[in-house]
Image: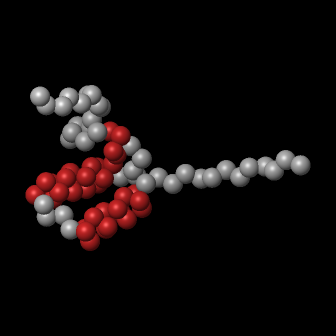
């Protein structure tokens, strides 16, 4: 019997919204996710490509600012 997964909200192109939520350019992120999935399924994804994708995804993420805490005396 096949596994069943819960339905999740998706973009118009079929990518779960959670995957593109924090990116600056959502369409580019979605394109990259789709192309990476195709390469992975074919077995043509190299380690060098995966490292480049990881760096790109980290750079694409929105940065949050850290608030300084006031020290109490």
Residue at 27% from the left image edge and 49% from the top image edge = 30
> How many marks are shown on the rendered structure?
0
Residue extending furthest toward the front:
1
Q: Quadrant of the N terminus?
A: top left
Residue extending furthest toward the right:
73
In the rendered structure, the answer to whether residue 44 lies left or right of residue 29 reads left
**Is the residue 14 above or below the residue 52 in the image?**
above
Q: Can residue 35 be seen from the camera position used here?
A: no
Q: Can residue 3 be seen from the camera position used here?
A: yes
Depth order, front residue of 55/31: 55
The spot of residue 11 in percent (x, y) is 27, 38
Residue at 32% from the left image edge and 67% from the top image edge = 51
How are the residues colored?
secondary structure
The spot of residue 58 in percent (x, y) is 41, 59
**Is the residue 21 above or below the residue 33 in the image?**
above
Examine the image and state in which quarter residue 3 appears: top left
Residue at 30% from the left image edge and 53% from the top image edge = 29
Depth order, front residue of 72/1: 1
The spot of residue 50 in percent (x, y) is 27, 64
Residue at 85% from the left image edge and 47% from the top image edge = 72
């Amino acid at each position: 019997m096949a596994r069943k997964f819960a339905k999740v909200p998706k973009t118009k192109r079929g990518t779960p919204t959670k995957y593109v939520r924090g990116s600056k350019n959502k369409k580019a992120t979605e394109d990259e996710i789709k192309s990476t999935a195709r390469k992975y399924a074919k077995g043509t994804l190299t380690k060098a490509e995966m490292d480049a994708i990881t760096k790109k995804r980290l750079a694409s993420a929105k940065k949050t600012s850290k608030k300084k805490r006031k020290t109490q005396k």
